[in-house]
């Protein structure tokens, strides 16, 4: 980590009434007067203006930062926003703020192979998935993650993680064996199925409701085939269709009948006059490449094909990591819902949404398989039965137009992936953590965080 822009204690200018930082944290701090502030204040989705950025280097720094933020709230009697940032790519943009504190975990990016035979690895919360993909690939291992390498491990692993191995391996959080957690009272502990299982339940899907995670242990999957390699089949297709409802129904049936080794992501764009372009990324992960051939061949006939490419690729290739600095450069808004069935009704709703002036593109990600085999009560990700995630990328034209543009898809949603949406209203939280999951998560957060310290972003406590 570049330390040239970090403060010495006498350089810090904190808002009036704020207590002084402990000595250790003063050496980890960045405020507006320092040269590095402009490069550290923002996330990918939002330009921030925090009063204080704490660049934690150790777990003790995280603990001290949590205790400082709690003290500040107690002494000021006001809600000073407290944002947790691992990679800073979060869709909601809430890993930054205005006038508050950012706890930056990006220096906690260690990777340790604990047991190559079991695929057991320990990963710091500030690592990015592109970094981890490269280190796992050296051992022919993978962890189901998202599809973009600049995303932080901490934010994704605690919120969900729908990647190219979702149907074969489940969500990212399903690979979690245990987590190192700092709760609002500054206590640090490992949590797993046998040690404080309720906190471990909440960490897997509850985002920051239980606290802030500094490290994870995951059980990675060995993808070596009987031939001894760990290549992944990656099929990229571009379709043109004049009936998005029919295409969506045919795609859904194809995925439904395919082995769990197949994952399929779609990006959909309206071309006008009822025409849509659909870009498909189909990934086959695991042994049995002979089994993959007929499945991927069937994909070629789902609609008029404009372009086709199929290749064997290593794991890091499908989670590209440009390692771009985050300066609020992405101004779009996003919405998503989890939908029970990938059918023509979903395709019609997507066409309606894409017909709205605010909508840029639509996105469909296949679920089912290993995601659905985990009981709904097992983790704080409480929506397991849906077949598809449906999302749209929206121009930032205001909340009313965003709602209108997504309305046809919203009514089909029986759940939501909270971390893949810009909507942080209470209604969105209740859809992300529905029914008994939400009731249980809220009760736990009230017990673990009675001061509501970790109340930034999507949560059930507002």
Image (spheres, rainbow, N blue to C red):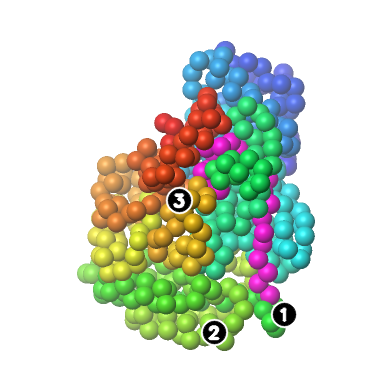
Q: Which residue corresponds to the image point at 35% horizontal and 61% vertical from the top-left?
A: 340
Image: 82 above or below 190? above
| Residue 197 image offset from top left, x and y in percent | 61, 44
x, y percent for residue 225: 67, 79
Task: Out of 349 and 330, give the one closest to the viewer.
Answer: 349
Q: Give the residues in magenta.
A: 204-224
Residues at marks 1 and 3, CA–CA distance in whole angstroms: 37 Å
Q: Which x, y percent locates residue 307?
A: 43, 79
The crowd level at tag 1 (other Cα within 10 Å; few <14, some 14-19, many 20+) is few
Write down the residue under mark 3. 382
User: What is the spatial separation of the Cα atoms under label 3 and label 2, in whole angstroms?
Assistant: 32 Å
Tell which tag, 3 or 2, sits nearer the viewer. 3
Q: Secondary structure at mark 1?
A: loop
Q: Residue at x 27, y 42 (%)?
A: 400
Q: Is residue 153 magenta?
A: no
In what quadrant of the picture does the N terminus appear? top right
- The front one of 79 and 116 is 116
- Can residue 18 be spotted in the picture? yes
N-term-proximal mark, 1 vs 3: 1
Q: Which mark is drawn over residue 291?
A: 2
Looking at the image, residue 198 lies above or below residue 390: above
Element type where label 3 sits in the image: loop
* The quadrant where residue 320 appears: bottom right
Q: Badge 2: few (under 14), some or many (20 or more) residues near its Cα, within 10 Å?
A: few
Disc 3 crowd rating (10 Å Cα; few below 14, some 14-19, many 20+) is many
Relative to residue 64, is residue 429 drawn left or right? left
Q: Nearer the viewer, mark 1 or mark 3?
A: 3
Can you tell which quarter of the image residue 460 is in? Answer: top left
In depth, the one of 202 and 313 nearer the eye is 202
**Disc ID at residue 228:** 1
Q: Per the image, is 219 magenta?
A: yes
Residue sitting at 57 percent across and 53 percent down? 173
């Amino acid at each position: 980590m570049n330390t040239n822009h970090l403060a010495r204690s006498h350089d810090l200018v904190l808002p009036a009434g704020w207590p002084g930082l402990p000595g250790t944290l003063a050496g980890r701090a960045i405020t507006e007067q320092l040269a590095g502030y402009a490069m550290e204040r923002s996330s990918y989705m939002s330009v921030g203006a925090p009063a204080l950025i704490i660049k934690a280097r150790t777990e003790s720094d995280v603990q001290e930062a949590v205790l400082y933020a709690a003290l500040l709230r107690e002494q000021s009697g006001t809600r000073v926003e407290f944002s947790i940032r691992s990679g800073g790519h979060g869709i909601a943009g809430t890993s930054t703020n205005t006038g508050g504190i950012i706890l930056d975990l990006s220096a906690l990016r260690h990777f340790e192979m604990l047991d190559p035979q079991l695929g057991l690895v320990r990963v710091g919360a500030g690592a990015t998935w592109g970094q981890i993909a490269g280190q796992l690939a050296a051992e022919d291992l993978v962890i189901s993650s998202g599809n973009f390498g600049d995303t932080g491990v901490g934010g994704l692993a605690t919120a969900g993680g729908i990647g190219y191995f979702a149907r074969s391996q489940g969500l990212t959080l399903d690979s979690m064996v245990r987590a190192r957690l700092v709760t609002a009272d500054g206590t640090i502990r490992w949590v797993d199925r046998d040690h404080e299982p309720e906190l471990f339940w909440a960490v897997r899907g509850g985002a920051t409701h239980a606290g802030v995670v500094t490290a994870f242990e995951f059980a990675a999957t060995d993808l070596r085939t009987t031939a001894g390699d760990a290549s992944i089949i990656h099929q990229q297709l571009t379709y043109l269709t004049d009936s998005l409802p029919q295409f969506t129904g045919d795609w859904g049936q194809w995925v439904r009948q395919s082995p769990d080794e197949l994952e399929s992501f779609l990006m959909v764009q309206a071309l006008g006059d009822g025409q849509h372009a659909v870009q498909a990324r189909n990934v086959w992960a695991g042994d049995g490449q002979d089994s993959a051939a007929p499945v991927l061949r069937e994909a070629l006939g789902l609609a008029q094909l404009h372009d086709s490419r199929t290749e064997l690729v290593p794991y890091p290739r499908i989670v590209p990591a440009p390692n771009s600095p985050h300066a609020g450069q992405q101004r779009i808004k996003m919405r998503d819902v989890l939908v029970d069935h990938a059918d023509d009704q979903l395709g019609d709703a997507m066409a309606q949404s894409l017909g709205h002036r605010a909508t840029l593109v639509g996105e469909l990600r296949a679920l089912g398989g290993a995601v659905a085999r985990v009981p709904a009560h097992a983790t704080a990700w409480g929506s397991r039965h849906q077949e598809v995630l449906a999302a749209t990328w929206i121009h930032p034209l205001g909340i009313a137009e965003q709602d209108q543009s997504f309305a046809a898809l919203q009514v089909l949603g029986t759940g939501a992936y909270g971390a893949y949406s810009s909507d942080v209203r209470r209604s969105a939280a209740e859809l992300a953590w529905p029914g008994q999951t939400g009731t249980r998560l809220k009760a736990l957060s009230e017990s673990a965080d009675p001061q509501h310290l970790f109340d930034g972003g999507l949560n059930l406590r507002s």
